[in-house]
Amino acid sequence: MEFFEDKCKITSPGGIFNASMEEIMKGTQTYRNHKLVNIFDKLGLIENFGTGMPRTFDAYKNEDRKPVFEATDNFFYVHYLI
């Protein structure tokens, strides 16, 4: 996570696995490591329903400032203007 005077930027290495940005924005689930997801699910640390992105958009629907999501082959970024 990086903080700048006007924004916060979160960078996740690896890009989107086995899906398009459009599919992810609609709630498509995709995992690099199914066993790790299963463990986190059993521990109650994740919900494992693919609703994270849709819930994020819903949370910001009435806000002037919204996070910006960007994906490349190698990284996934979230930018938020402060």
Image (cartoon, rainbow, N blue to C red):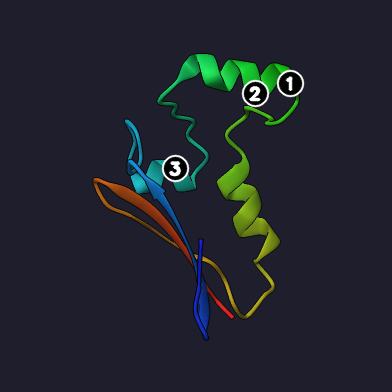
The residue where tag 3 is placed is 24
Tell me whether the residue at label 1 lies in contact with that at label 2, contact meaning CB atoms closer than 8 angstroms. Answer: yes
Front one among 36 and 66: 36
Front one among 11 and 18: 11
Q: Provide residue 32's location: percent of width, then percent of height.
A: 40, 25
Going by the numbered disc 3, the residue's amino acid type is Ile
Q: Residue at x 67, y 31 (%)?
A: 46
Mark 1–mark 2 Cα distance, whole angstroms, equals: 5 Å
Q: Is residue 22 left or right of residue 68?
A: left
Q: Which mark is residue 43?
A: 1
Going by the numbered disc 2, the residue's amino acid type is Phe
Q: Is residue 82 left or right of residue 13?
A: right
Q: Is residue 30 left or right of residue 61?
A: left
Tell me whether the residue at label 1 lies in contact with that at label 3, contact meaning CB atoms closer than 8 angstroms. Answer: no
Q: Is residue 30 above or below residue 76?
A: above
Q: Is residue 29 above or below residue 73?
A: above
Q: Provide residue 65's location: percent of width, then percent of height.
A: 59, 77
Q: Residue at x 44, y 21 (%)?
A: 33
Q: Is residue 42 above or below residue 74?
A: above
Mark 3–mark 2 Cα distance, whole angstroms, equals: 20 Å
The numbered mark, 1 or 3, whose residue comes first in the sequence reads 3
Going by the numbered disc 1, the residue's amino acid type is Leu
The residue where tag 2 is placed is 40
**Labels 1, 3: front one:** 1
Instruction: Tell me the crowding category of disc 2: few under 14, some 14 to 19, or many 20 or more residues within 10 angstroms, Cα based.
Output: some
Secondary structure under tag 2 reads: helix
Q: Which mark is residue 19?
A: none
Front one among 77 and 5: 5
Secondary structure under tag 3 reads: helix
